[in-house]
Image: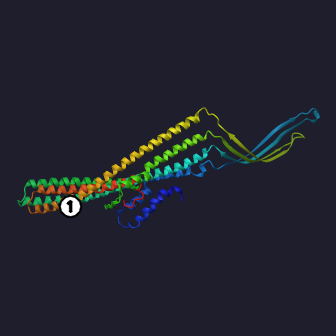
Amino acid sequence: MMRHTNVFTKFLSLICVLAFGFADAQALLSKEEAILLTLENNYNIKLTENSLQTAENNASLYNSGYLPTVFTRGGASYDVKDTETSFQNPNQDRSVEDAESRNYNASIGVNYVLFNGLGRYYTYAKLKETYNLTELQTRNVMENTLLTLFFAYYEVARLSENEVNQRETLEISKLRLKKAKYGFQYGQSTKLDVLNANVDMNNDSITFLGVQRELANAKRDLNIVLGRDVNMEVTVNTTVVYTESLQLDTILNSSLESNVAYLQTQKALSLSEYDVKINNSTWMPSVSLTSSYAWNKRSNDPTNQFSPIGLTQTGLNAGVSLSWNLFDGGNTTTRVRNAKIAVDTKELEKEQQLEFLKRDVNNAWESYQNALFTLKVQKTNVETNRLNFERSEEYYKLGQISSIDFRLAQVNLINAELTLSLAKYSAKNAELLLLQLSGNLLGNKQF
């Protein structure tokens, strides 16, 4: 198995184990199945995997400069010439027409750089470090894609709950309108009660249609992340499990060791340091070895009695060459100075990223704590409003409160349920963001 698959297979193996117990014949799309579909079909992940394959090829021994170059050459020529040869004695003069000459040659050779000032060593080391950086970039894409996936997944879950709540609210409004009409017919309510109930039912119908439209759009957004047809029907799991063991100090320490953005700045710094070493190596001499084995054959028609009619040569040759660029007009000096400036720049970027990371972790932690507190309060608030609504409904049926008071209790309940649903998924999204900042998102078991 190729090395570039490690970042994928490690995560896939975890998800496959988790998904084993969730596969069933229902249309419900579990979180584990959503991850598998995303890793398999998402275009961003496919593109970054290709980039990782390219980086792996670049970091191979074949691209290192450590291997020799082996070449072979061959050729053949054919000549036809008329020849006239004159001697001091005219009787010895000769004239030859259509004299043929044939030449054949073949050789095989090896070129190898014995030493080039450690430039080859540092270049190869830089290529391997570039691969490590590409691995981090791949992991970054995977983390961002998973965040996008679950933000979309939980948005579908939130709107699905909202749709249920709005449908119940609409049904209650329809019953209220029906009751108001009956009451008006028997003189127990006024025309104003009927009009108010009708307006409220119309408003609830409009709200319900709006939630349905938002839910349909959210499902299409989720299908885009999953890499499948946007109009495919999808039903998600609305159960949310939170990680209770999160601690701010632990997250901060983990982020310094595993946060992908911070690790990328460290790799970028290492690459800049290699550039300094590579440019410094050009001050050193370069030593190369060349060796070849050659065969040559020549055959000729005789033009006189002393001319040879054939010649065959074979032989081995070897040589060592040394080159040393003593002065190149200051180009190397300029490159070294600029490379050192680049190292200083990367050092500053690393320090800046560290401060950004600390800020982001603390901000995300406060958002997470606020979301959990809001969730806790809203659970109590929903229970209070539900109890108030149930009593108001009883009193309304008994005619002890007005339809306006009943409507107010109904509106308070639906608003409380919507706020609770929003807090429920906002807290989970804040938790996932914390896990990403700490570098533990891919290893998380509770999505």
Task: Name the image quarter holding the C terminus.
Answer: bottom left
| Residue highlighted by disc 1 | 383
x and y, in percent, of residue 153 in the image? 34, 56
Res. 335 visible in picture: yes
At 81% from the left and 38% from the top, the residue drawn is 81
Measured from the top left, where is residue 426 in percent x and y?
30, 54
Q: What residue occupies the far front of the structure in this picture?
A: 249
Q: Is residue 198 left or right of residue 116?
A: left
Determine crowd level at label 1: few under 14, some 14-19, many 20+ residues with C-alpha closer than 10 A: some
For residue 270, above or below residue 176: above
**Residue 242 sits in which quadrant?**
bottom left
Q: Amino acid at mark 1?
A: Glu
322 or 55: which is nearer to us? 322
- Check the image and report above or below for 94 versus 46: above
Q: How is the image coloured?
A: rainbow
Q: Is residue 338 left or right of residue 258?
A: right
**In the displayed structure image, the side of residue 58 where residue 443 appears, left or right:** left
Q: Position of residue 252 (x, y in %)?
A: 39, 52
Quarter location, residue 356: top left
Residue 386, percent across and down?
19, 60
Residue found 19% across the figure and 52% down from its top = 203
Q: Tell me the residue at 77%/46% (across/down).
A: 104
Q: Residue at x 10, y 55 (%)?
A: 193
Front one among 102 and 437: 437
| Residue 230 visible from this viewpoint | no
Left or right placement of residue 414 versus residue 356 in this view:
left
Q: Quadrant of the N terminus?
A: bottom right
Q: Nearer the viewer, residue 382 or 333?
A: 333
SS for tag 1? helix
